[in-house]
Image (cartoon, helix red, strand yellow):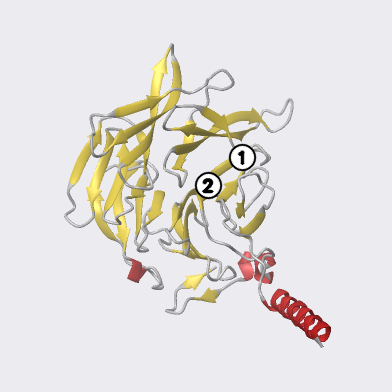
Amino acid sequence: MTHFIRHYRSLLILCLSFVYSVFIVNTVPAEEIIYQPNQWLQDGIWISDINGSKERRLYNPPLLIKELSIQKGDRYLLGVGNGTDPEVGSDVYLFDTNNLGKGRKNLTYGRYGFVLDAAISRNGDVVFSNSILNQHPDGIYLIQQYEVQEPIPNAEKLYSGPADNVDWAPNGKEVVFSNSNGIFLLDTITREVTQILDYGTRPVFSPDGNRLAFIVITDINNKRLGKIGIISLNHPQEVLILDRDTKKTNALPHYLTWMPDGDTITYGLCEVVPFAPGDTRKRCEYLNFAVSVSDGSNRPIFTNFKGGLRTWEWTRKSFPVEPIAKLTTKWSQLKLKTQNGGTNE
């Protein structure tokens, strides 16, 4: 009798395990990065661990994503990419990770000329900077989270004047931006602007919101060099400029983001190389590095990704291992509606 009970219990556990494996979707836990690969080699938005061993495509939009932002909690991805006519402008696009087959949603529809950068807050508010005709600075605009799902979201102007890169503070109330005069902090409630530095570009908040990382461009011996700077917002007199190893390349940093640990900054360089030996056309070969805030040491990262990564952000969300069928559908054939009537492509 005891033997029968043991046998029955083992059989029951085996059956339950089989049922669990059939009805539970397998996921990849704690994915590391969502990224745009080298655009000359691969299209789309991808997700992978940092070693590139679990690489797969999330979206295949017919556009080049120049900037990338992820909402805390990973619900929405925000990208800046060329519009239908790159000579007319560039737009802000929203991707919903809860519905991978929905496609992209255009939030700006070419109404703001050339969008330069955009970011999404933890609450789902969107800010973007823009210029008209790619040469006349316009300002910084805000799309409230309740406007995001509208067919044509309304955007209100927060700041008039030149602004290049923008980033949300973790508190969802302040925006940091840069222009040729330095780095500034914008209070989105009072609209007050405070200058942080009179130099630097591409500022990004640390995960705790207490520091900014930025890029410093300097001229040494008639050569332009780019280094990584860090400033404490609690003690703005404390600025740290980290040295870079320029033995292999003098290419300027073009992208910058913090790792979730708050002690490491990752950045990318664009090394201009020929398409092929003897070819006069040029393309970017991206080199990616991580620099430690505590000791300033640099190390290469993403070395297993052919051609390097153009843009990337860190994520903790799990997604199904196999992409859903709609991801292989031609994007020109996807014309879906959001729950409030917004058009997706």
* Residue at x-position 40% and y-position 52%: 118
Determine the secondary structure under disc 1. loop
- Of tags 1 and 2, the one toward the viewer is 1
Residue receiving disc 2: 312
The answer to whether 65 is drawn above or below residue 249 in the figure is below
Residue 342 lies in quadrant: bottom left
Image marks 1 and 2: residues in contact by CB distance under 8 Å: yes
Residue 8 x, y percent position in the rendering: 79, 84
On the question of residue 160 being in view, the answer is no
- 279 w.r.t. 323: above or below: above
The N terminus appears in which quarter of the rendering? bottom right
Percent position of residue 186, x then y: 24, 48
Which residue shows up at 53% across the image and 60% down it? 317
- The amino acid marked with disc number 2 is Trp
Q: Which residue is mark 1?
A: 302
Helix, strand or loop status at disc 2: strand
Tell me which numbered mark, 1 or 2, is placed earlier along the sequence: 1
Vertical relation: 106 (above or below) 298: below
| View extreme (top): residue | 221
